[in-house]
Amino acid sequence: MALLEVENLSTHFFLRRGTIKAVDHVSFSIEAGETLGLVGESGSGKSMVASSLLRLIAQPGRIVGGAIRFEGVNLLSLDEKQMRSYRGRRMSMILQDPLSSLNPVLTIEDQVGEGIAIHDKLSGAALRDRVIEVLKLVGIPAAEKRLRDYPHHFSGGMRQRVVGAIALACRPQFLIADEPTTSLDVTIQLQYLNLLREIQQRDGLAMLFVTHDFGVVSKMCDRVAVMYAGMIVETASVREIFNNPCHPYTKALIESVPEVDEKVDRLSSIQGQPPSPLARPKGCPFVTRCPVAMPRCAGEMPPETKISEQQQVRCWHYV
Amino acid sequence: MTLSTGTEQATTIHGSSPAPEVARPRSLGLASRLPWFPLAVLVIFVFVAVFAPLLTSYDPLGMSLPERLKPPSHLHPLGTDTLGRDVLARLFYGARISLIVAASAVVTSGLIGLAIGIASGYLGGAVDAVLMRLTDCFMALPTLLISLVFVMAVGPGLTTVVIALSIVGWSRFARIIRSEVLSIRERDFVALAKIGGAGQVRIMVRHVLPNVFNTFMVITSLEVSGCVLSEAMLSFLGAGVPTPTPTWGNMISDGMPYVSTAWWLMVFPGLALLLIVYSMNLFGDWLRDFLDPKLKQG
Amino acid sequence: MSEPLLVVEKASKSFELSRGVVFSRSVGSVRAVEDVSFAIEAGQTIGLVGESGSGKSTTASLVLDLNKPSAGSIRYNGVEINRRDKEAWLEYRRSVQAVFQDPYSSLSPRMRVRDIIAEPLETTTKMSRQEIDRRVAEVVEQVGLPPDTPRLYPHEFSGGQRQRIALARALAPKPKLIVLDEPVSGLDVSMKAQVLNLLKELQESSKVAYLLISHNLADVRYLCDWMIVMYLGKIVESGPVERVFAEPLHPYTRALLSAALPHHPDHVVKEEIILVGEIPSAVNIPKGCSFNPRCTYAMPICRELVPARVGIRPQHEAACHLYPEVVAASGGTPASKEN
């Protein structure tokens, strides 16, 4: 059994203007020690999947269906108090912006120690030792001396490490990383990704890596799920996604990004705009921009089709 | 830790479709949630003030001693005062004074404050330092006291009241608008205007001014209620528009000695004042939320 | 030989840090850009690469006359851009335009698209209303927006479309040079490809020169024929894009290239160079070569002597003491120049 199994998860936002299906029948699973990349453009709902897993969806949004099974326990059936024992302890999260993820008026010790104090009931010297240990784990030099520092004493890359320390403080089994390196410079990004990989290999951490950068996907992930308009349109191993992308959206997405290691003359680009979240097509959401759309695509939602052991795609061309 | 959708902004797309990250719901149709009650009160207020002569057959100044201190009846719906004048008619004509004073004082102080706020915020440097110290000085003045002193020195009258209220009012506009301009000045479109060859005046008028307009409207709406109140207070203290011209302030003042015997003299103008100020504040709050681009664009 | 379109010569910019309101005193200065020289020929595309704090955006603001250089000169068509000669200034303002990163901040929300695009024409040309309207319609079509675009407001457009509007405005006065400051960094993958392609097409048809400021090496490789790498306010390497990619000379350039992750899992990075530490604060610039505290090849001389930028290969320059030419050239400049 996988560590995390998500089945038909749907999260909707109920607005005056209508209902937005931010996450629409999303299913995937993650094994212990495995990294699943969740790729998509802004508006595809990838961040909403991440928030839904921790049940952090605020009004007017609501998880309306499906199941999130963590070690066999359906998180959606827990009450809020039970859920809190999962958040931060067994599942944790790193967000994109280190500046807004940290509270500017609390010391690093307080912020990193908060979760440990709540979940592991540590205090005093024991708590401090754990905080130092975690800060060392994320590679903060001279951690002992920096406990009383505030976030503004740290550079952007170091701040993101502190955010990582907070997330990893209670040794979670599962980490959600929501674009953790988007705001970092490339050389700092490389440091950070290597660090995450090291920690993952040491602790057997499972990760859900939300990103829009295929370079990061290749470096970090074992498998990839591609999201478009709230749905997962294709899931595959990283190698399959690049060598044999099946969904027309996946293909277009991969071809539209310039590569560093080769000179191309023209990028192929996806025409048009993503559909309005309030007015999604009845069938395949990509139908409005798909170069190989058929009449059937507009009317009926394609079912998930298995291409190989790890690869599944939602496209009528493969049914 | 709250979860938001990060930097992704909600957008509307021309032609077909928006691509917002599910984002924050956009304003949930604030426009459809118009503040009906305050709006109705304000419309009635303006209507009454403008059409006062058509709405009542009584002369607000017409004395009739036999009719004095009559309680509300079908002849005089709100009763009569100590000189037998119809309270309803005086209330209607009083609304005119309130409207004129509030509108002129707010327009005058608003325009001064807008100009000073924009110049100060956009030009910065020494201009800003001088203008803002000046603003600070005026802000430190107690409105009522200064107005009183001014009115006493120049002599009461409609114009004097307007000038007195504007003297202090502009500084609040200038302060808030300046801080708004400071952030607008850093936006890329201002840099692009410079790159496009626009001069300082053009940038202030075409780029900065339209973008502080929302803020300006919100302060205006809140200032109106402040001015109505201040005018009433000045009149109440005898430093406003002199009698026999009816204003809500002097009506309350005149009715005070009779509060136990002829309650209607004080209650009706007081109620009218309360209603207007309350509605104006509600309306201002609504306007602020409605115009707030953060609420509107997620 | 005539002078190139735009010449930046030994330009430096530092920002004074002051404390106190009434008796403000200077408490030091931050070096944003130092001794930056390069030239842009007509129709050329130069990529200016570096991480945050490298001074690339300050360089752009100097070229655009949004900041005045503390030292050095910037000439357009051989004329100093700070000179207030009305004719030359108008010509410069007309010919040098810009597109910025954030498409939400670059368009005034209270102006119609028509007025946004028309502004540079109204201020720098004597065109009539009809001529301006015609030109606006022309550029709107050129950037691939629907013809009713001019009468709408910016909020009716998505990020990618707004960036097209910003580009239309830049194109309107038929500029010779457009400064592109991270033009696609704020866009989604699919929009990004559209805008990058559009930029390339526009250049092919109008022969405008681009100065592309970017932290994304893949974008620079796609769009540019020449690139400049900056670190802590200085140019550390410059040369033709393909040559820099094939044979990066400066260790910082090598680290940057190795940190740019290739997408395909089968394309492996030749040598993964992980830099230690982060870019230092511009208030405390290391002595000698600014890069020495993070450099794997740092030698004693790197901590002493500021490396000069000299040609190592044809057209390909670097400022690094690993190359004897640099040491020789830097020997002439005293090491105390920093102070």
Image (cartoon, grey):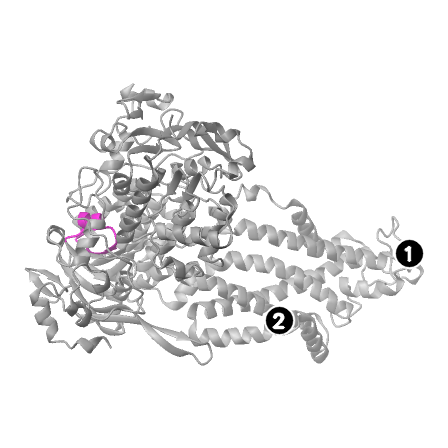
Q: Residues within 10 Å of mark 1 (few under 14, many from 20)?
A: many
- The residue type indicated by label 2 comes to Val
Percent coordinates x, y for residue A124 in the rendering? 51, 54
The local secondary structure at tag 1 comes to loop
- Res B168 label: 2
Q: Relative to the observer, which residue lies in front, B181 or A2?
A: A2
Q: Which amino acid lies under the numbered mark 1 shown in the image of this protein?
A: Lys
Question: Tag 1 or tag 2, which sits nearer the N-term?
Answer: 1
Q: Is residue B244 magenta?
A: no
Q: Find the distance from the CA under tag 2 to the CA under tag 1.
A: 41 Å
Q: Give the image location of residue B61, x and y in percent.
A: 82, 63
Q: Name the side, left or right, on which B52 lies relative to C29.
A: right
Whether residue C20 can be seen here? yes
Nearer to the camera, A165 or A264? A165
Mark 2 neighbour class, 10 Å CA radius: few under 14, some 14 to 19, many 20 or more: many
Does B43 sit above or below residue B190? Answer: above
Q: Quadrant of residue C77?
A: bottom left
Residue A29 lies left or right of residue B64; in this view the side is left
Please state the horizontal and vertical placement of residue C167, each as a whole percent of the image.
29, 51
Residue of label 1: B70
Q: Is residue C13 above or below residue C182?
A: below
Q: How many marks?
A: 2
Foreground of the two, C139 or B117? B117
> Viewer-proximal residue, B145 or C53?
C53
Residue at the (46%, 41%) spot, across then down: A89
Q: Reply yes or no: does residue C207 show up in magenta.
A: yes
Q: Which residues are drawn in magenta?
A: C205-225
Q: Pointer 1 indicates a residue of which chain?
A: B
